[in-house]
Image (tube, grey):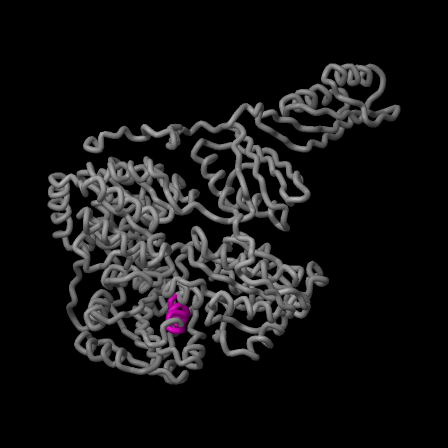
Amino acid sequence: MAALNIKQGSSSHSAYDLRDFHSEVESSHTLAVIVDNEAGVLARVIGLFSGRGYNIDSLTVAEIDHKGHRSRITIVTRGTMAVIDQIKAQLGRIVPVHEVIDLTIESQPVERELALFKVAGTGDKRIEALRLAEIFRANVVDSTLESFVFEMTGTSEKIDAFAELMRPLGLIDVARTGVAALPRGL
Amino acid sequence: MSRQMTGAKMVVQALKDHGVDTIFGYPGGAVLPIYDEIFQQNDVKHILVRHEQAAVHMAEGYARSTGKPGCVLVTSGPGATNAVTGLTDALLDSIPLVVFSGQVPTFMIGTDGFQEADTIGITRPCTKHNWLVKDTEKLAETIHQAFHVATTGRPGPVLIDLPKDVQFATGTYTEPKTARVDHYQPRVKASIEQINDLVALIEKAERPIFYTGGGVINSGPGASQLLRELVDATGFPITSTLMGLGAYPASGKNWLGMLGMHGLYEANLAMHGCDLMINLGARFDDRITGRISDFSPDSFKVHVDIDASSINKVITVNLPIVGDVGHVLEDVLKVWKARGRKVNKEGLAKWWKQIAEWQAVNCLAYEQKGKSIKPQYALQRLEALTKGMDRYITTEVGQHQMWAAQFLGFEAPNRWMTSGGLGTMGYGFPASIGVQMAHPDALVINVAGEASWLMNMQEMGTATQFRAPVKQFILNNERLGMVRQWQELLHGERYSHSWSESLPDFVKLAESFGWKGIRCENPDDLDEAIKEMLAYDGPVLFDCLVEKHENCFPMIPSGKPHNEMLLAADAEAFKEGATLV
């Protein structure tokens, strides 16, 4: 090693990865995976995660280009830097996968989730739920005399926070879409 | 030019257009239209197997010995599920295969029809890619894409599932050259910065080593040629994985032998002590690395692989290069020559002196004494008596496989077919038939253990029917030798179910299929018996009764680093102090 005069893990070229692969610290990454919208493509992506023991915290998928039959799968996953890099490389070799973008590395992405909350209650609790919904900019999309359905978009953390507040006020059901994300700027 | 034809006819037409001369298969209800087309032509030869698993292994043998994709045709349901082991084997060893499976008609899919299985679902994780074709209009395009995907980038098996109504229906056949393949074009060339960096390392290294794998073989004969040129010109030592044997000739002066769990002492210690490791098309398999934390602790590691996911998967490397081994070698040679062919001569001389000391340990030493044949001796005699012949060797899995890798020398690529990644017992016999179909006049020998060999012995009929003069060289120790060895060394000598009970009389078995059977149990008779096998024009079942309790050394016990390998002489001491890991 001394004769080579190169410090392990470093390089003069930016093409090399200077991150610490040995780090045991896990972090959350949001990946955008652009795929051909063909039969079974989602199963391939999910099968890769289950088959190789990776985590999926959230997953959304929809066709984004009807003419080109392209879909965008947004996956929030968690792992050490080495695991995240391996996940991206494994995704990249699935034949119908065109592009894998690590939004967390490339920018602080804009991340949004849509959620629906059903809250049942009467009297003070009902009034309090409505007041909090206003503060969180949640919309009432269905109401009866004993219940509301609120619709809200926001970060996953905001939705978690709202759900926590609604719980003592009669929250009986939540439906969440999972994260959709885009990089900021150009 | 496009033509109208049935889906079944398209399959055969596409095979012809892709230059396929042989397909291995087994008919059944869901592929009858294709078999009807096969019946009416003579360009594609169909080899009728006795079990679909064997069809896939035959296609693997065909592919590995020719560099062309192997083709298989099986029916729906059990035909497809029987193919799964072969597909997984081909996936792990990166062997290009195109497998066609029949499927129930599209309108019956999902109804649990007769011989229906979710073939696409079952084979998704054991193929590089697979397709269910629901429209005859898309069939030709799909087949062309399948051949492209199987053979491009890191090769692998692909499967096309063909519902019976799609085979009957008529559609437009399109030519291979019109197929859309631009979406799958893996990168083959490395950047010039990376090449320059690698050359700079080659110029300075004091203790370098080339560590090569199956990727060199898969890259084609040109890559092996370039490798030989670079190794000989730099004077660097070279070792190879099980998969890469033959890329550099065993008679070459820089050859250290195979590395890994049962690799040579000098190869493993050179890996452990090197300061520059150049990995060309190998993947740091766990049988190679031993304990990860102690793997080659002081080296700068370069990894060239066409599959980006192989890099930094197991071992973190310092210079990752995504590209085809052949392309990278060509560029490295060009740049290294242009910069004046420099190497660190002084460092290298010291390094070779150290390696010579390791080589002097003579790690493969064994003693042929008494009246029983040592398996190593049998292979040494086979090697000596086939020297200079352009022979093709396949193996099953276990001790005999490791001994074959240690004691047989390979001078050219594509001459050594063994199940490396998946370790599939039962691989070697059908693979040898596949090799023989591709090279009808060549000497093809399957080095086998009796237990592995029994796993696909039904293919004797196939060899007889298609006049494949394959030689089955069985090292018969009446044991599952490798299992027995681990039980001896690591499980307190409790030999749980590791013997071969109720074995057939192999000579009579051979004769019952019209083969020649030879039994040999005396070392003095061995040479004559091997010569008899080689001289016989037809399939031979050679029952070589060998020492029953011979262990395969050297051995790196799992979880140990390279520099803690066991030689035969250390085994007793190890047993006493063994802890199971």
* Quarter of the figure with the N terminus of chain B: bottom right
Residue B66, visible in the rendered structure:
yes
Between residue B5 and residue B29, name the one nearer to us.
B5
Q: Position of residue B83 (x, y in %)?
A: 51, 64
Q: Position of residue B407 (x, y in %)?
A: 23, 62
Between residue A38 and residue B504, name the one nearer to us.
A38
Q: Is residue A135 above or below residue A87?
A: above
Q: Quadrant of residue B442?
A: bottom left
| Magenta region includes residue B189 | no
* Quarter of the figure with the C terminus of chain B: top left
Q: Position of residue B59 (x, y in %)?
A: 44, 66
Query: Is residue B203 rendered to the left or right of residue A62?
Result: left
Picture residue at 49% right of the left edge, 65% below the top: B18
Q: Quadrant of residue B63?
A: bottom left
Q: Is residue B183 above or below residue B72?
A: above
Tell me the magenta residue range: B428-437
| Magenta region includes residue B432 | yes
Q: Position of residue A16 (x, y in %)?
A: 37, 32
What is the magenta segment's predominant secondary structure? helix
Between residue A55 and residue B31, name the one nearer to us.
B31
Picture residue at 45% right of the left edge, 31% below the top: A80
Query: Is residue B224 rendered to the left or right of residue B175?
Result: left
